[in-house]
Image (cartoon, grey):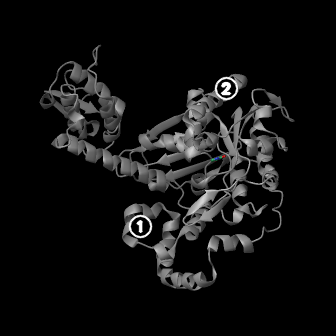
Amino acid sequence: MREVVLNEPGDFAEWRNAARGLLASGVAPEDVSWRGSAEGASLFGDEAVVAPAGAVSLPRELLEIAKRVICHRDAEVPARLYRIIWRAARDRQLLARATDAEVNWLRKADKAIRRDVHKMHAFVRFRRLGEEAGRESFAAWFEPSHRILRLTAPFFQRRFTGMDWAIVTPDARAIWKGETLVYGPGGTKDDVPDSDVIEDQWRTYYGAIFNPARVKIDAMRAEMPKKYWNNLPEAQDIAPLLAGAGARVERMREAAVSLANPLTDKWRTRVPDELAPDDDVKTLGELARAVDRCTRCPLYCNATQGVAGEGPKTARIMLVGEQPGDQEDLQGRPFVGPAGQVLDEALEEAGLDRTRLFLTNAVKHFKFEPRGKRRLHQNPTSAEIDICRWWLDKERALVQPDLIVTLGASALRGVTGRSASIRSMRGAVHELEGGSKLIATIHPSFLLRMPDRERAAEERKAFVADLIRARKLAA
Ligand code: URA
């Protein structure tokens, strides 16, 4: 009997190395006993498992699933996974056998992990710790059902590149200080402060999006299980909001008689406050909060939040889009919707790493027209772009990129202050006041709107070529 002791339960690389060695040596699942190091014994028992050359090949999909399922808390998982890969090495169609009990178990376990990952992405709440050398730092405590920190941390790295943070879970912690993700031992809730000013923002946001007419308590509990409530600042408002829901629905009903569309009415009656004072923002974090408070033009009235740029302060390339879209408005991050997907793919093809770029928009609030339940994008006017240049200029001053790439005509106006056609500016490198260079290209959503596939493919190629030129220039 071979005994494999895993030092880090949930660590895919450790399990894979052992499993590969066993598989290549022809050790059958029934001849292996898998244990966690807490149960004692040396790493590979009496016979070390070394992956020999010419390792057995396995379906890629299975490895992808195994990478997730190894994070499952069930102590039997390493053994079950080994049994499955043992069989898959002999039966390439194994994963397609939906009635197979082990495949069935694998799919269910995978679903549980993916659900846990989704919950962690949604329910981690950072508390501000302070600021050092111009970088703000945050920490969050989270108790996932499984050992999924390594699966989820890269998401937070992409999302919060510009700040320092730590996420502490009972099993492990992830730490990001702007360069590499580092993992350390688990901790306790006491490692993280339990409240701060950001909580107020969550509570305000939750109160604003809470729709008393659409309360479905069971669905709510399923989506936001009670076990997460302790760490969610907004959760303390759920009970009072629910208690007042009946009265709010009544008020909405009465108001509906005179309001054809509450959104358009709000648009007409709310006027911008006085211009905001010249917020003296010194960090990207301060800037993001100031953008969210911005009332310099009426666009703030209907948007969920102001969406500031995202990326490291040290970025050499700044990409400027037009304005947040529907998804960006909800998530508070630039380029996370369909246009963002097109952009991500083009960046990858051009060899540009999104996490090293600073992505922002000429206009920081979503401008849309309500159409039933949908919000249809509207182009910002020149005046709106010009007013919002206030923020773009501040981002430029803080990041000081060597190169700015404008995506579309609104971005070009936002950066240069004048209207010019992309065609007249494309293909050349322009000098901007203050020393940055400028490359003008199309907006990725232009590719999404093109009905002619061949032309779209050509345009896409030219778009990628512009991004490659940007990469070379910045290098
Ligand atoms: N379009 C943009 O211009 N910016 C975004 O952030 C998203 C879509």
> Which of the two residues, 172 or 93, is positioned nearer the viewer here?
93
Residue 382, how many percent across, how many down?
Answer: 80, 52
Q: Quadrant of the C terminus?
A: top right
Q: Is 396 left, or right, of 47 in this rendering?
A: right
Tell me, yes or no, if residue 2 can be seen here: yes
**Number of the label disc, if any, that sits on residue 471:** 2
**Residue at the image point whose x is 27% and y is 15% from the top:** 52
Residue nearest the observer in this picture, 464 or 387 = 464
Residue 406, image x and y in percent?
A: 73, 38
Q: Is mark 1 within 8 Å of ligand 1?
A: no
Q: Front-most of 297 and 463?
A: 463
Of helix, strand and loop, which one carries label 2? helix
Q: Residue lying furthest right in this view?
A: 433
Q: Circle 1 sits on which residue?
A: 220
* Residue placed furthest toward the top: 53
The quarter of the image holding the N terminus is: top left
Q: Is residue 155 above or below residue 52?
A: below
Question: Residue sitting at 34 percent across and 47 percent down?
Answer: 113
Q: Quadrant of residue 103?
A: top left
Residue 53 occupies quadrant: top left
Mark 1, Cα crowd under 10 Å, few <14 / some 14-19 / many 20+, is few
Q: Amino acid at mark 2?
A: Arg
Label annotation for residue 388: none
In the image, taking residue 384 as reference, residue 223 lies left or right, namely: left
**Sequence-first tag of 1 and 2:** 1
From the top left corner, tell me how far across and down residue 282 is, in percent.
76, 48
* Mark 1: secondary structure: helix
* Residue at image coords 52%, 41%: 175
Report the amino acid beneath label 1: Met
Q: Judge from the rendering whether residue 399 lies leftward or rightward of residue 201; answer left or right.
A: right
| Label 1 – label 2 distance at C-alpha | 45 Å
Q: Nearer the viewer, residue 161 or 182?
A: 161
